Amino acid sequence: MNEHEQFADELALYALGALVGPEKEALEQHLEVCSPCQSELRQLQSDATLLALSTSGPVPPPRSRKRLLQAVARERRAPVTVPKRFTWWLLVPYAVSVALIVTAAFLWNESRSLNRTLANLEQRHSEMEKQLRVAQDLVNTLTSPESKQITLAPVKTLPQPQGKAYYVSSSGHLIFLANNLAPLPPGKVYELWLIPPAGSPIPAGMFQPDSRGTATVVNPPLPIGVEAKAFAITVEPTGGSPAPTSQPIMLGAAG
Amino acid sequence: MMAATQAVQSDAALVSAMASGDESAMGHLYDRYSPIVYSVALRVLGDTGMAEDLLQEIFMQLWRNPAAFDSSRGTLAPWLVAITRNRAIDWLRKRRPETPVAEVPLSIEPDLASKTDFARSVGKIRSILDRMPTTQKDLLEMAYFEGLTHSEIAARTDQPLGTIKTRIRSGLLALRMALTQ
């Protein structure tokens, strides 16, 4: 017997308002989380209303209609009429009303101002927290005992360019610093690759060196937990490539 | 079906007019639904004077707080019938209202705005109740019209609780089937 079947008979009693005690409480708890039973309950409540149709026949006496419409007329929704005679004390309620409105407007304005201040403080707090988290991640990546430091050197003998990658595989955090990089022709970009022990190289960010030939890549989107066999850099068309399209110009094996 | 839809719109339009103070709209709604409201009140309370008082209360409640009825969630007639039955049971048991009007469940069926549909529905319901075993019909009526709890019904009928539950459920399902045939 599944849970719905268990409650099926109780639902019918509940629809009629006839279920009480612990069984009612148990059903109400189940109803809070069970959409099919909520739907069946609504249907059973409609079914119960059908029972009312069987009573059809008697009609109320004509006086009931008159009585109702008289009561409705007594509670007519009509505009308030203005008194004809003017006396100064009739202004008192209006003066009080105006004072209340002015006070309410002042308090409302104060409340809005406080709400704005609170919202600004919350936003600043949130931004500072975010910056702190980023800084903490940077420090962790540089100082973690798990952090591997990899020095990348040119494949061939032109020794000047150099890159260092700091990588924590368990968090997927990577910081890459490079210098002495040659400027690139238009339409080209350097792309960093994480080379896992098995499988294809994983893109680890694109960069352009500045006028001094330095560049950084901080926390590019990387899958978490991937060990690095090496890091490499290739020159790719602007926008990067999903897989290297040229030979690496720099390569560094992870220790 | 089209006629029913038009009738639903007409109910909604009358409630809307009544909400803006149109007393004649209130009169039209009364003419349309006072018989079923009165019948249910009379069936539960068993007293014409009390039934008239409850009829007055139900319609005055609609006049004072038309927003309590949300026409986008159901039709007027089942809602009126449900609050009438609930209030009548409250009166019968001399207790404070247990279900706030806003929490009375709304449904589309039965749509009683059309007189033809109404007469046909009444015929089907009476027919299925006539064919139902008396013991089962009594159980439904004890719960719906007398407001008895399941343990009170068990005590009165000397039937096992499980049997009562099953018979009440199958009785309600039979009513549902009657309208779909």
Image: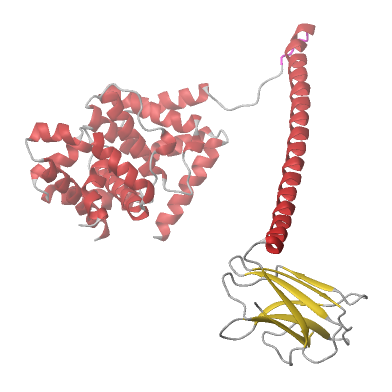
B150 left or right, relative to A196: left
Magenta segment main secondary structure: loop
A255 left or right, relative to A191: left
> Quarter-wise, where is residue A147 in the image?
bottom right
Residue depicted at 54% across the width and 40% down the height: B17
Give whichever of B16, A31 is nearer the camera: A31
**Placement of B107 over or under A100, stated as above or below:** below
Among all residues in the image, which is located at the extreme right? A211
Q: Inspect the magenta stretch and tell me whether residue B164 lies in it.
A: no
**Placement of A93 over or under A35, stated as above or below:** above
Q: Can residue B124 be spotted in the picture?
A: no
Q: How many marks?
A: 0
Among all residues in the image, which is located at the extreme left? B158
Write down the region rendered in magenta. A83-87
Residue depicted at 40% across the width and 55% down the height: B4
Residue depicted at 50% across the width and 40% down the height: B15
Give whichever of B128, A67 is nearer the camera: B128
Q: Say how the picture is coloured.
A: secondary structure
Q: Position of residue B83 (x, y in %)?
A: 36, 35
Give whichever of A54, A11 is nearer the camera: A11
Q: Can residue B4 be spotted in the picture?
A: yes
- Name the quarter where the N terminus of chain A is drawn: bottom left
> Quarter-wise, where is residue A248 in the image?
bottom right
A196 left or right, relative to B118: right
Q: Position of residue A95 (x, y in %)?
A: 78, 15
Residue depicted at 33% across the width and 39% down the height: B81
- Name the quarter where the C terminus of chain A is drawn: bottom right
B132 left or right, relative to A39: left
Q: Position of residue A143 (x, y in %)?
A: 69, 61
